[in-house]
Amino acid sequence: MANSIRHLIEEAVKSSMRERNKERTSTLRMALSEIKKEEIDRRVELSDEESIKIIQRMIKQRKESAAQFFEANREELANKENSEISILQDFLPEQLSEDEIKDIVLNAIAETEAQDSQDMGKVMGLLKSKIKGNADMGIVSRLVKENLQG
């Protein structure tokens, strides 16, 4: 895996160090550390898909933190979290637009013949395999709920 996500992040760390971009360097080192920790814990080399899941988890944590900081009027900390999110998003696959997600959701609802919110699990199970890291699952979940109720 010469151009694995891990390798791309390692190269990005080197270039950000050369550019003396401390924030980018520390954020990318944090991501690398999370990936390496998971590899050590599981004693395997992670696939790109697994690395993407780790990066998505880090982004989700930062979004939650940013929201809490913003509510507490700590905008400088919220901005730092948002900045880290944008750095991490560079290593995710191209994200689907909300309209594209809605089309996929509607197809999945039709495919599973889902009728109401009790069928949400079926639909989400199918969507996880179809979307595979190309969308924020929070948005996907919201769209499924909206389309199963209405």
Image (tube, rainbow, N blue to C red):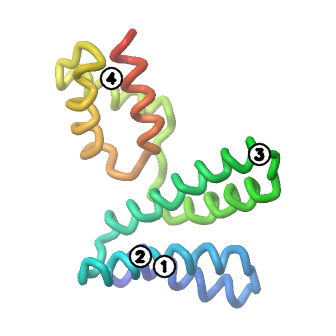
Badge 1 crowding class, 10 Å Cα cut-off, few under 14, some 14 to 19, many 20 or more, is many
Q: Which residue is mark 3?
A: 72
Q: Residue at x 61, y 58 (%)?
A: 85
Alpha carbon separation for disc pair 2 and 3: 31 Å
Judge by depth and name the residue closer to the eye, 14 or 79: 79
Relative horizontal placement of residue 32, taking residue 25 as reference (left or right): left
Residue under the image location 70 percent in, 90 percent down:
18
In the displayed structure, does residue 109 sit left or right of residue 26?
A: left
Number of numbered tags placed on the structure image = 4
Q: Which mark is residue 32?
A: 1
**Farthest residue, direction left:** 112
Name the spot of residue 131 as percent of width and height, x first: 33, 45
* Disc 2 to disc 1, C-alpha distance: 5 Å
What SS does tag 1 mark?
Answer: helix
Q: Looking at the picture, how far across and down is residue 48, in whole percent? A: 34, 69
- Find disc 2 in the rendering and name its residue: 35
Q: Would residue 92 appear left or right of 65 to someone viewing this image?
A: left
Residue type of the residue flagged with mark 1: Leu
Residue drawn at x 68%, y 88% as measured from the top left: 17
Residue 107 position, x and y percent, is 28, 25
N-terminal-most mark, 1 or 3: 1
Check disc 3 and give the amino acid type: Ala
Label 2, secondary structure: give it: helix
State the residue position of label 4. Answer: 106
Mark 4 vs mark 3: give the one in front: 3
Label 4 vs 3, first from the N-terminus: 3
Q: Position of residue 34 (x, y in %)?
A: 45, 74
Residue situated in front as seen by the camera: 111 or 39: 39
Residue 112 vertical placement versus 77 (above, below): above
Of the two numbered discs 1 and 4 on the same chain, state the one appearing first in sequence. 1
Q: CA distance from mark 1 to mark 3?
A: 30 Å
